[in-house]
Amino acid sequence: MENISYEVNDVVRALRLLSTQIQRDIKDDLKGPADLLVSAIKGRTPVSAKPHSRYKKITSSRKRAMKGAGVIVATYRPGNLKRSFRVLGKLRRMRNAVMVGALLGGKRADGYYVHMVNNDVKMTNGKIRIGQRFVDSAIVAAGPIVLRVIQQIVSSKIETTDRQTRSFGNKADGPGSWWKAYARIRGRE
């Protein structure tokens, strides 16, 4: 009975150390796999042959100015959408994760229209323009590779933590030694 309780305690200690260690380095560790996904999306992003413009609305009755009418607010050059995809790691809400997407409102690259190119869009004349679904195809193509890389990162973290807990937490050492190691890793010592 005592043997099982020691083993369970060792597992709990290892999980606590693992969660602390993974949370500390998670963003840096996930940037590599996220870059793989970004390059897959950039490779499948369509590039227009000519620049496109966005216009300021003329009157308050219309939501948006028609093509060629009004003042040009922004001009989107060919390849702009491809340049806008990146790893969005500095989002406040994303504490333990990174996000891949189009940068919105950038100076050189503004990907505000990525949903119009990727998804189906209802035009002003009532027709529906079929989306190109390039993001979905890139995720299908690169997804298994990215998941495999993430699994390798997590397994290496588990092995590292396992080695640390084995060297610090012995039954003969008593409960004090693993607690000191845990406190040192947490920065409490």
Image (spheres, rainbow, N blue to C red):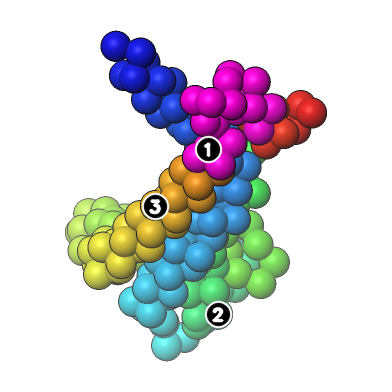
Disc 3 packing (10 Å; few <14; some 14–19; many ≥20): few
Q: CA distance from mark 2 to mark 3?
A: 43 Å
Which residue occupies 66% across, 72% down? 108
Foreground pick, 64 / 181: 181
How far across and how far down the image is residue 78, in percent? 50, 82
Residue type (three-letter) at the residue carrying disc 1: Thr
Say what amino acid the circle numbered 3 marks: Ser
Instruction: Note whether residue 71 is visible.
Output: no
In the image, taking residue 133 as reference, residue 83 lies left or right, namely right
110 shown above or below 171: below
User: Hey, what amino acid is under mark 2?
Assistant: Arg
Q: Residue furthest bottom?
A: 49
Task: Give the labeled residue for mark 2.
Answer: 77
> Which image quadrant for residue 106?
bottom right
Residue 82 percent location from the top left of the image: 48, 74
Look at the image and tell me in which quarter the C terminus lies.
top right
**Residue pushed farthest front?**
172
Which numbered marker is on residue 155? 3
Residue at which label 1 appears: 165
